[in-house]
Amino acid sequence: MDLKHLQSFIRIVEFGSLTRAAATLDVSQSLLSRQVRQLEIELGTHLLERNGRGVVPTEAGRELVEHGRGILRQVEVARLSLGQSRGVYAGKLAIGLPPSVGSTLTVELVMRFRERYPQAQISVVEALSASLLEWLQLGRLDCALLYNPAVNANMRFRHVHSEELNLIGTTRDGRTLPESVPLATLGQYPLIIPSPLHSVRQLIETDAARYGVGLDIRLEIDSVRSLLDLVERGVGYGVLSRNALLTRRGEHDLRGVPIVMPQITTRLVVATPTQRPTSPITEKALEIVDELIAEGRLNADR
């Protein structure tokens, strides 16, 4: 498979148009059509379908885009590794961060990376751990920080931080919370928590089921910001890490207290794929992440 053909196909799908892709790549539309046809012949399947607004990928085409991005990234990593072996750190790095971590680390991570490696480019993607893990496996990310991942033979995990979960409520209208909340009493609080895809939700439900605690889940909200907005308005209570509460900027009426007997602990790990080597520039970025965590950036009050 010709890598240029693969790159062209991905660009066509991204634009949804042969014409726009041809203009961006500075080639003729007929050349792109021949490249797509060659890919279809090699793979024995149709990859694009025309509609009134341009072209869309078939199911096979969408699968090729996902695999193709990973293939092209691996080729780029190999090229960069050869240059970095001579002491030159250049190229692109894509790192994934959960939103609560990104809100505290992204800016300083980018600033330090740019200062130390001016010839390299860093891309930061913020998403739920489940999505980050999928993109790591597809090759769209070089590394990621994940919360509470399950054992995965395709990933290397290195623990970097632990934190107990808190019950978060509002102090508006004279409302109060105890100094701590036993897990056995958690069912007394109407909860606003993330959807089942969120690692925190999985952790809460696993521990609640283990100790026979029924939960009163009123709303499912994946956005930490929106979840905290609703908690502050008195709609319910959240269960998140203290770090999530620290992302709240400015004055607010939120308070978090630890869940105890037992504590529910969330684990943050660095994840890198086992099926491809970690590039030197990725290792340098993760060194900066380690620095920021060691400085207490995930716990520092604003």
Image (cartoon, rainbow, N blue to C red):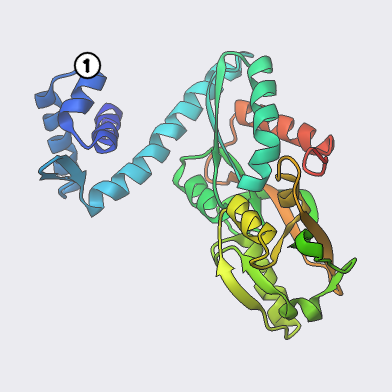
What residue is at 56 percent from the left and 61 percent from the top?
A: 221
Answer with left or right where residue 291 lies relative to residue 106: right
- Residue 33 sits in quarter: top left
**Type of the residue with mark 1:** Asp
Count of numbered circles in the view: 1
Residue placed most toward the observer, 71 or 146: 146
Q: Image height check: is 298 above or below 265?
A: above
Q: Residue 140, percent across and down? A: 46, 40
Q: Which residue lies furthest to the front in this view?
A: 173
Q: Image height check: is 31 above or below 151?
A: above
What residue is at 59 percent from the left and 58 percent from the top?
A: 152
> Quick one: SS at disc 1?
loop
Q: Which residue lies furthest to the right in this view?
A: 179
Q: Residue 249, percent across and down? A: 71, 41
Q: Residue 88, percent across and down? A: 60, 13
The image quadrant where one finds the C terminus is: top right
Answer with left or right where residue 129 lies relative to residue 6: right
Answer with left or right where residue 136 lies relative to residue 49: right
Q: Does any portion of residue 98 appear in the rendered image? A: no
Residue placed most toward the observer, 75 or 196: 196
Neighbours of disc 1 within 10 Å: few (<14), some (14-19), many (20+) = few
Residue placed most toward the observer, 265 or 171: 171
Residue placed most toward the observer, 80 or 204: 204
Which residue does the numbered mark 1 point to in the structure image?
26
What residue is at 66 percent from the left and 29 percent from the top?
A: 107
- Residue 175 sits in quarter: bottom right
Q: Image height check: is 226 above or below 186?
A: above
